[in-house]
Image (spheres, helix red, strand yellow):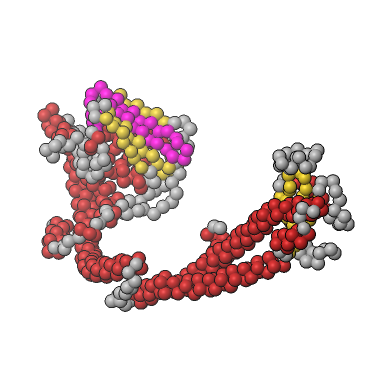
Amino acid sequence: MSYRTFKRLLGETSLERKCRFLFGGGLLILIVGSFAFYGSRTESLIDEQLKTTGQMLIQPIIALKHWQVEELTGAVSKEETKDLEEGIMQGFRYAIREPGVDSGRPKDAEGHQAMDRLQRGENEILRHLEADDQDNEDRYQYYGAVRAAASCVECHKGHQAGDLLAMVEVTFPAKRIEKKKAENNAILLATAIATAFLAMVAAYAIVRYVIVKPVLHLKDVSDQIARGNLDLRADIRTGDEFEELSHAFNRMLRHLVAVQEELRQVNGSLDAKVDELAQANMRLFEVNNLKNDFLTTMSHELRTPLNSILGFSDVLAGSSNINDKQKRYLQNIQTSGKDLLTMINDILDLAKIESGKMEVRLTEFDVSESVEHLVGMLSPQAEKKNIDLSWEVDPELPLLRQDEGKLRQIIYNLLSNAIKFTPEGGRVQIAAVADDDQMELIVDDTGVGIPLEDQETIFEKFRQGNTTPGGNNALTREFAGTGLGLSIVKELSKLLGGEVSLQSELGKGSRFVVCVPVYLAEQQPQLDNSLAQQAIDLSNLRRIDYGLLEIAGRDASGSDES
């Protein structure tokens, strides 16, 4: 029987009832089986005993038959034969039947069947016959075979040794046997009932006081602990597994109390640290806003005089009364001014992205026109270094619904970086391909490449690849720049709903892949503040020196005012 079947039969009940049910059911099965086995064994013993008695009576009956024959010849007196018969048959009836001789009884089918079986080779047969017209009571009928021995052949002519000479029929009254059997069954039933009753009483006591009582005690203790009484302990002294269970329960409870106390202390300390962290975050947020405002203001303020410098340098460069040396000086001024203006614009864009003020202006445009325009703009720089600059746009690429200006800025930064870091005689290629509802911008170059250890940090702000072990940036020394180009590419790609990836090998070139959706839905600008996104490990919190934050805030405010 499976557990589910047992559960359906017994239902949701107590442990005590389950134990009683199981023990009572097992005991019932055991008693019924014992009765059936004992009854079958009793019947077998009675049959064996009757067969044994019948076998023991065959020889005296044959001897009595011979005496009766001798009585006819006068060798044995009639009184001796009668005494022998009374001594042998004590309450039994017998008859001797020869093969082929009718018994004379009108209904003797059992005798005929027994004779047939003995003639086929059986030696004895025992039957339980019910009362009939001739016999008014039940009886047991024993049929035994009398077979010819070597000494019998001399008298019984025409027979051989082993032939069936006669069949002895012994009748045992069944009344006395059935009475004894009933008395025995009554004694057995009374003993079984008494045993079952005592076993149930013992099972009740064992289940109630040995099993259920300790369990109920543990349940009561658990209920009290659940209500907040943590000073209570289990007290079971049985010297068995329940006592060990109570000790384990008490150890667990003591450990629980200790852990709860530790958690209470940790929570108190954590609350204080979280409060400190919240105040520190507020101060850091204010300082970060001051930094952003400072960068935005300074970028605007620097661009105004820088535009004047570039404008007047263009005017001076157009004058006819300056010599070659002065033209070189003016060219240096213009180059440096344009580089400085690019850096200021990058810083301003980065400040807008971090503050969440960068807006996305969606329009429909053909990306091939933007790529062609930017390639034409950067072709002079590529020609100066004898770099093969080529482009290709998938003709199946549909019109984009994106921010054209920001996408152009991404392409410009990637192409200018590729040209900058590609040596003379190299190759730079840009391609735009369709990938389901996405567009991939792929920029390949044969430049210096980026080491594997620097590829994870190349998109960080103010970082360039190929950093030496000493901490000096070799590429920064060789190629001027702030390290903001790829950072802006990454932030703009995320702003346009895409991402940028890198594949590069040192000395063989790099491949930048920008994947953006062809159709960008209307969305609100997301604040990409690295300070807000960084995970903070509260387990390592320590007290913040607010004096330093106040000094940093005053410095930023003072710089802004100045």
Q: Tell me: 129 left or right of 401.
A: right
State the extent of the magenta-drawn residues as a range.
Answer: 421-450
Nearer to us in this view, 259 or 517: 259
Q: Tell me: 146 left or right of 341.
A: right
Instruction: State the image coordinates of residue 110 (x, y, percent, origin top left).
Output: 80, 54
Would you place residue 117 above or below residue 12 in this image? above
Q: Locate the N terminus and report the quarter of the image it occupies.
A: bottom right
Would you place residue 520 above or below residue 184 in this image? above
Q: Is residue 475 shown in magenta?
A: no
Q: Is residue 432 shown in magenta?
A: yes
Instruction: State the image coordinates of residue 541 (x, y, percent, origin top left).
Output: 20, 60
Instruction: State the image coordinates of residue 89 (x, y, percent, origin top left).
Output: 72, 61
Q: Locate the C terminus and report the quarter of the image it occupies.
A: bottom left
Nearer to us in this view, 229 or 434: 229
The quarter holding residue 507 reads top left
Q: Is residue 250 visible?
A: yes
Residue pictured at 82% horizontal, 46% vertical: 99
Would you place residue 478 above or below residue 296 in this image? above
The quarter holding residue 132 reads bottom right
Residue pictured at 36% horizontal, 38% vertical: 514
In the displayed orientation, state which residue is furthest to the front. Answer: 74
Q: Tell me: 337 left or right of 212.
A: left
Nearer to us in this view, 485 or 224: 224
Q: Is residue 380 visible?
A: no
Instruction: State the image coordinates of residue 247 (x, y, percent, origin top left).
Output: 30, 68
Residue pictured at 49% horizontal, 68% vertical: 19
Total tally of numbered discs in the picture: 0
